[in-house]
Image (tube, rainbow, N blue to C red):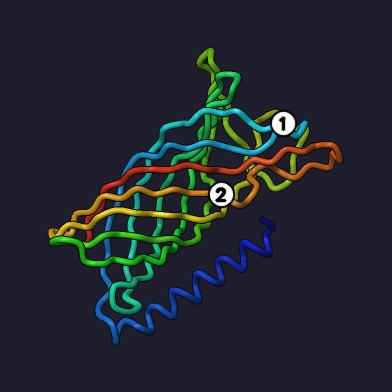
Amino acid sequence: MNKKMIIAAIAGIMTGTAYGQSMVKETGRTSFGIRAGVNFQNINGKDGAGNSLKNDLLTGFNAGFNAEVPLSSGFYLQPGVLYSAKGAKWASGSKVKLSYIEVPVNFVYKPVLGSGNMLLGFGPYVGFGIKGKVESPNGSSEDVKFTKDYDATAGAPQFKRFDAGGNLLAGYEFANNVSFQVNAQLGLADINPKTTLTNDKTKLNNTGFGLSLGYRF
């Protein structure tokens, strides 16, 4: 996903949020919530030779808040801001740990189920890398450099700062406004820097799933 596609995604998010706000008077009030949980993340794709990566999941966490804007009966627009720890365990034994501030915007359906509501949703997200490091099996670590274009003189692991992709979620919200949620995330933007090497086939994408608890005020 290039910069134009990311800008288009952000524009779509802003347009959807504005539309949702225009519907509030007709369908109800906007509510706010907090959410935190655990991530099981990976970095999938190909190495420089074009071989599929065989990384293992890395456990992290996420925490943040969101708004829930009514669109029509049972349907909501849910923009949020989230801190999310991502990364992977390389086959070599090293661990890549990347931290992002993410802005997900999900379209959520909440049909009544028992005394509460089922949660079903999907939507895009954009992410901004704020820090990262690579930990080697011997215990040493090295900070990640975020860059758009690969710098052969940097002497540090390098990743793009921007990420973008899609979310899927399912869960349940109890009558007391406490909820639990399972979500899956597929990164569509390559997080490896561009290189001038014509034979480099590297392609890295964040993927993963998570479990979280939330409360709506």
Q: Residue at x 75, y 45 (%)?
A: 194
Whether pointer 1 and pointer 2 mark residues with C-beta atoms closer than 8 Å, the reply is no
Furthest toward the bottom, the residue is 26
Viewer-closest of 18 and 177? 177
Furthest toward the front, the residue is 114
Q: Is residue 202 above or below residue 78?
A: above
Residue 53, quarter of picture:
top right
Q: Amino acid at mark 1?
A: Asn
Viewer-closest of 121 and 140? 121
Circle 1 sits in a helix, a strand or a loop, which is it?
A: loop
Residue 156, quarter of picture:
top right
Residue 110, quarter of picture:
bottom left
Q: Is residue 196 above or below residue 165?
A: above
Q: Amino acid at mark 2?
A: Gly
Instruction: Determine crowd level at label 2: few under 14, some 14-19, many 20+ residues with C-alpha closer than 10 A.
Output: many
Q: Residue at x 70, y 48 (%)?
A: 148
Q: Is residue 171 left or right of residue 132?
A: left
The residue to which callout 1 is attached is: 51
Furthest toward the top, the residue is 138
Q: Is residue 167 left or right of residue 160?
A: left
